[in-house]
Image (tube, rainbow, N blue to C red):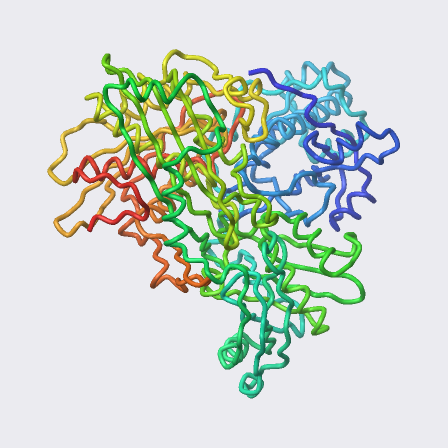
């Protein structure tokens, strides 16, 4: 693998600047890193007068302790562990001596948005370079101390060892290394992957002990400010619509209720960062706030989506998916190929609105006082929250501090800062610290939902049993429509999640879309458009295999064609490679083929199973990661579906922290099973009908896979995403397994066998 050392710049940081930026007092070696992916570096390279500031800090104290400022949000992915692991490995630091400190929201840290499964791939090389630079500085300091050539010195497990056997600890060398100039990039050597100690090895997360002992601080745990009040909001069931009137007399009689007032609605579309508005109840405690809200008498205005009925809306999308749409990718002549086909496979698929429902509902503690705003919140996008707060409060952004807590689940919901802005606006009104609480009902009825999607696929097979044509139509409202009423067409990025990036060597291909208007708040949910595209494509491939009389895995391998890097830019002008250049992250059919072949082997594909049981297969590339999945199901006489085993094969490049990769896939399988088997949001009269887990169903333990085996491919390629790739192939693999067990095709989610 070619390693680019010019992706970041390393420089020394003064103690004064470090203290100013981190509020931490340290001694020894202090380094800053500026990433090329950050606005800081872009401005620097375009403006010679721009002051150079670090995106990240590394410190090595005189006592030998290493500190890394973690600029990403921890929500169960282990990112607060995986990124420091990379640095510590290259540095030859003792992992037990490494401390991780959470960064506040600040542009100096570069991109802090923990979304899109790109944290490791973005910072892998810069952090390796930083660790290797520290290692070389320590080796140089030791060489100077001993009066020997640096080639005779080697950093090993938190000390530098001379070829004679004598050694010096990192703590002793810290100040001496700080006095040396930063080494030239040409002199910095990265480790060979065979020498990795932590990167590709099992490691527990740094927060594990605090989490299991109850010491970890999540957003809901923040109660540390004196005189903090509790707030809840009664919101219009129709997003963006306003308030006609309310009567608060009974609510004010509830002991502990302090004040009741209104927040203005945003109108529709609502945007991704504005509160929905409504009637605010502030109280001394949670119980009083909830009882006060319950006692409110409210009359709501109707908005522009008062006629929104999800059943009618979805049926219309499905009807239009069967008609000619806007061409987004076209190769060959699909219509004539279908006309001349001996067999034609035709299928329609429907995916409903879905809710994020993280275990920890949205919440935030805010204190607005003396023209400053301080917030403690579980946010995925700290800088986005900071900017939204500054705009809503009309404050200079430097007057806003966003402290990032641990996130008790997120799945994309907590990258939208509406709940944080609510807390701050209420705090300003009250003149005290305020903690905003969202109940589960608030969470389910006022989410940024995963959009519904209707799809129509038509595949032609010729007289030689060869697949000659592929027509895929997809209709769904674009996420951009939540902020822009004119946005009605799916973006190229959304279509590059499993539709226009279809990799099979089929001569005649056409992908089409129709416009769809956003009628409620929608936003990205774990895996985004890959969910519905992988579902439709994976299930259709299974039908094609049946029509061809070919084993489903062999069918996929046949359709892949020769090993090659697919130049999607020549097949469609709208292809998006998750923000990366194709030359840096090629679409490799060889890697895709390998995970499929390995899944066939590891899952004991085709094994004898009793009646009512079956295996299903699907494979998908998302967030630059190749995944093949085999799901085994049993279906009893009462149509109860049980999932005895799932086998994943994952090629995510260099596997950083394999323990976390496995955990992500184990959790991803449970998440996907829940979406496929249980979950559905319905809307009538503009209002969501579900309110809690009694009618918005999520998977229980009995619905989750009993065993999830995660097989990680060895690789020295650049690391890619692992948070979202588990979900897309699981759902079609599950549906194909249900077909193998029952003979019933699943073309609408959630799965209903009766």
Tell me if residue 679 comes above or below residue 743 in the rendering. below
Find residue 391 and report its horizontal and vertical position in percent.
Answer: 73, 55
Residue 341: image location, x then y, percent: 27, 19
Please state which of residues 689 and 381 is positioned toward the viewer in this rendering.
689
Q: Quadrant of residue 564?
A: top left
Q: Is residue 473 above or below residue 593?
A: below
Determine whether, in the image, residue 563 is placed left or right of residue 181.
left
Q: Residue at x 51, y 17 (%)?
A: 567
* x and y, in percent, of residue 59 in the image: 71, 38
Residue 210 visible somewhere in the drawing: no
**Residue found at x 62% / y 64%:** 265
The quarter in which the N terminus is drawn is: top right
- Vertical placement of residue 749 versus 588, above or below: below
> Going 51% across and 53% down the picture, which residue do you hit?
448
Give the number of callouts: 0
Q: Is residue 220 left or right of residue 632?
A: right
Front one among 564 and 712: 564
């Amino acid at each position: 693998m070619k390693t680019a050392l010019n992706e970041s710049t390393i420089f020394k940081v003064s103690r004064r600047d470090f203290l100013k930026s981190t509020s931490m007092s340290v001694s020894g070696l202090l380094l800053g890193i500026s990433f090329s992916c950050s606005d800081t570096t872009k401005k620097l390279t375009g403006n010679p007068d721009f002051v150079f500031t670090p995106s990240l800090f590394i410190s090595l104290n005189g006592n030998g302790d290493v500190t890394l400022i973690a600029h990403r949000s921890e929500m169960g992915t282990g990112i607060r562990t995986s990124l420091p692991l990379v640095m510590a490995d290259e540095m030859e630091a003792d992992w037990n001596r490494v401390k991780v400190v959470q960064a506040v929201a600040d542009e100096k840290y570069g991109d802090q948005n923990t979304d899109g499964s790109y944290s490791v791939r973005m910072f892998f090389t810069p952090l390796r370079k930083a660790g290797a630079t520290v290692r070389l500085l320590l080796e140089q300091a030791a060489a100077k101390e001993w009066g020997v050539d640096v080639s005779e010195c080697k950093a090993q497990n938190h000390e530098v060892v001379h070829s004679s056997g004598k050694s010096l600890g990192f703590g002793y060398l810290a100040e001496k290394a700080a006095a040396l100039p930063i080494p030239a990039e040409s002199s910095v050597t990265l480790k060979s992957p065979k020498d990795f100690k932590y990167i590709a090895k099992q490691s527990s997360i740094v927060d594990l002990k605090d989490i299991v002992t109850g010491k970890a601080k999540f957003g809901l745990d923040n109660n540390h400010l004196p005189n903090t009040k509790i707030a809840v909001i009664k919101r219009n069931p129709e997003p963006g619509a306003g308030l006609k009137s309310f009567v608060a007399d009974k609510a004010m009689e509830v002991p502990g209720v302090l004040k009741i007032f209104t927040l203005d609605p945003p109108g529709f579309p609502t945007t991704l960062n504005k509160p929905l508005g409504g009637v605010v109840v502030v109280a001394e405690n949670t119980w009083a706030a909830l009882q006060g809200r319950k006692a409110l008498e409210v009359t709501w205005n109707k908005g522009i989506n008062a006629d929104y009925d999800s059943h009618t809306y979805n049926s219309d999308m499905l009807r239009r998916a069967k008609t000619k749409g806007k061409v987004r990718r076209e190769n060959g002549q699909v219509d004539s190929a279908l006309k001349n086909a001996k067999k034609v496979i035709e299928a329609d698929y429907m995916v409903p609105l879905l809710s994020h429902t993280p275990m920890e509902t949205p919440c935030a503690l805010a204190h607005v006082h003396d023209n400053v705003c301080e917030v403690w919140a579980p946010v995925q996008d700290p800088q986005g929250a900071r900017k939204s707060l500054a705009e809503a409060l009309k404050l200079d952004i430097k007057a806003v501090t966003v402290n990032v807590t641990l996130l008790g689940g997120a799945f994309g919901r907590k990258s939208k800062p509406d709940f944080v802005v609510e807390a701050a606006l209420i705090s300003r009104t009250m003149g005290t610290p305020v903690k905003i609480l969202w109940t589960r009902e608030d969470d389910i009825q006022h989410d940024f939902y995963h959009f519904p999607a209707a799809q129509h696929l038509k595949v032609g097979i010729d007289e030689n049993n060869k697949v000659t044509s592929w027509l895929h139509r997809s209709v769904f409202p674009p996420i951009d429509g939540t902020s822009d009423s004119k946005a009605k067409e799916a973006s190229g990025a959304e279509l590059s999640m499993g539709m226009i990036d279809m990799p099979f060597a089929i001569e005649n291909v056409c992908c089409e879309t129709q416009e769809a208007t956003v009628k409620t708040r929608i936003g990205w949910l774990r895996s985004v458009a890959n969910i519905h595209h992988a579902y439709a494509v994976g299930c259709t491939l299974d039908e094609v295999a049946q029509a061809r009389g070919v084993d489903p895995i062999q069918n996929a391998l046949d359709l892949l064609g020769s090993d090659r890097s697919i130049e999607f830019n020549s097949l469609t002008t709208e292809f998006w490679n998750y923000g990366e250049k194709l030359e840096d992250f090629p679409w490799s059919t060889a890697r895709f083929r390998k995970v499929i072949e390995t899944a066939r082997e590891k899952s004991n594909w085709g094994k004898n199973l009793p009646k009512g049981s079956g295996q299903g297969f699907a494979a998908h590339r998302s967030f630059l990661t190749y995944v093949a999945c085999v799901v085994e199901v049993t279906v009893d006489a009462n149509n109860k579906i049980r999932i005895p085993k799932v086998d994943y094969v994952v090629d995510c490049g260099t596997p950083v922290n394999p323990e976390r990769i496995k955990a992500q896939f184990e959790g991803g399988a449970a998440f996907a099973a829940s979406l496929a088997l249980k979950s559905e949001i319905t809307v009538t009269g503009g209002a969501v009908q579900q309110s809690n887990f009694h009618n918005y169903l999520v998977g229980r333990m009995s619905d989750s896979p009993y065993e999830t085996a995660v097989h990680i491919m060895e690789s020295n390629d650049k690391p890619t995403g692992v948070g979202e790739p588990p979900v897309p192939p699981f759902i079609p693999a599950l549906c194909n397994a249900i077909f193998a067990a029952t003979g019933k095709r699943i073309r609408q989610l959630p799965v209903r066998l009766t």
